[in-house]
Image (cartoon, rainbow, N blue to C red):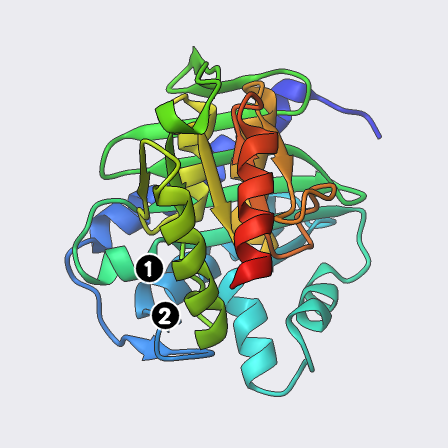
């Protein structure tokens, strides 16, 4: 593999900015809202249109690369073309070495309700390793970018995680999954337990932006129980390149193909994981 760092960075920025501009143009006019796996799991015409345009654009620019988009994966599962989300991802990836992971609107529920905490998230992988990612919130003109071993930036400025060392001084965030009532109930219990120990806890409705906010030092930690690789890939790279730490909810090694994530500034990581494990066992 001939790795051109600048070319990778420019490519993910280009795609994220294109998606974000289309998101901006459609903001405030959500139409054809439908449910997917549950009444909480929503998709709009804008999600599908932006993903289709970005997929076509990437394929024109990189014809040898596979593109894995959130809405395409959902369509394959719901239509019966694939038996599971993992199977749908494998179909879309086509066994190619280079893969793009695209979430056209991370924060669809926010988008529907006119809450400007939304983003287009884009990452490029080589042999299952995320090399570059970009998360763009067009409503606030914030572009988060990370390249493996080359750091993370916000609008070109280098990022570093926060310096809080105890939960009692930490602002945290979480998210509530869309596809299982039991999972939502469990996270309500985790939220309750963590809220009693942390300075405060937010749920902003965008996993990609929550991860980026950890990288930017706005949050000291974030956890969620069930996410897709398109939710995680770019934002997790921002956390890592900004000096943060990632794991699964049980403390095991982080993997974008596994659904749970804990992302922190590193200093509070063991405290947060221990608290989440304790709360999960007692729920």
Q: Residue shown at 47%/44% (left/top)?
A: 121
> Vertically, is 16 above or below 51?
above
| Above-or-below relation of 166 to 210 | above
Circles 2 and 1 in contact, beta carbons < 8 Å: yes
The secondary element bearing badge 1 is classed as helix
Residue depicted at x 15% and y 56%:
28
- What residue is drawn where x is 46% and y is 33%? 221
- Label 2, on which residue? 43
Quadrant of the rendered image containing residue 199: top left
* Place of residue 107 in the rendered image (x, y in percent of width and height, measured from the top left): 34, 54
C-alpha gap between disc 2 and disc 1: 7 Å
Mark 1, residue position: 108
Q: Say if residue 89 shows up in the picture.
A: yes
Viewer-proximal residue, 190 or 63? 190
Please give the label number shown on residue 147: none
Up-down relation of residue 192 to residue 72 (above or below): above
In this picture, residue 141 sits left or right of residue 18: left
Q: Secondary structure at mark 2?
A: strand
Screen quadrant of the N terminus = top right
User: Where residue 188 appears, x then y in whole percent?
Assistant: 39, 60
Q: Which image quarter: residue 130?
A: top right
Decide: few, some or many residues near mark 1? Use Cα within 10 Å; few <14, some 14-19, many ≥20. many
Image side of residue 226 versus residue 218, left or right: right
The answer to which image quadrant residue 5 occupies is top right
């Amino acid at each position: 593999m001939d790795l051109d760092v600048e070319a990778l960075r420019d490519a993910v920025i280009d795609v994220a900015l294109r998606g974000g501009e289309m998101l901006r143009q459609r903001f405030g006019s959500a139409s054809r809202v439908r449910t997917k796996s549950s009444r909480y799991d929503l998709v709009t015409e804008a999600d599908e249109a932006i993903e289709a345009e970005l997929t076509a654009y990437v394929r024109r620019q990189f014809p040898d690369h596979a593109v894995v988009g959130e809405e395409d994966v959902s369509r394959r599962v719901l239509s019966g073309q694939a038996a599971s989300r993992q199977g749908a991802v494998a179909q879309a990836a086509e066994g190619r070495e280079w893969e793009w992971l695209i979430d056209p609107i991370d924060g669809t529920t926010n988008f529907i309700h006119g809450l400007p905490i939304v983003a287009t998230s884009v990452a490029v992988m080589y042999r299952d390793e995320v090399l570059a990612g970009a998360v763009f919130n067009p409503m606030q003109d914030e572009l988060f970018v990370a390249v493996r071993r080359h750091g993370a930036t916000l609008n070109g400025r280098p990022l570093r995680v926060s310096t809080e060392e105890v939960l009692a001084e930490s602002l945290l965030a979480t998210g509530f999954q869309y596809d299982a009532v039991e999972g939502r109930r469990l996270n309500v219990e985790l939220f309750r337990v963590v809220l009693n120990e942390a300075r405060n806890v937010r749920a902003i409705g965008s996993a990609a932006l929550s991860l980026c906010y950890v990288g930017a030092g706005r949050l000291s930690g974030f956890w969620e129980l069930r996410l897709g690789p398109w939710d995680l890939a770019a934002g997790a790279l921002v956390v890592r390149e900004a000096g943060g730490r990632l794991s699964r909810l049980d403390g095991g090694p982080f993997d974008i193909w596994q659904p749970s994530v804990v992302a922190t500034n590193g200093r509070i990581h063991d405290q947060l994981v221990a608290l989440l494990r304790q709360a999960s066992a007692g729920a």
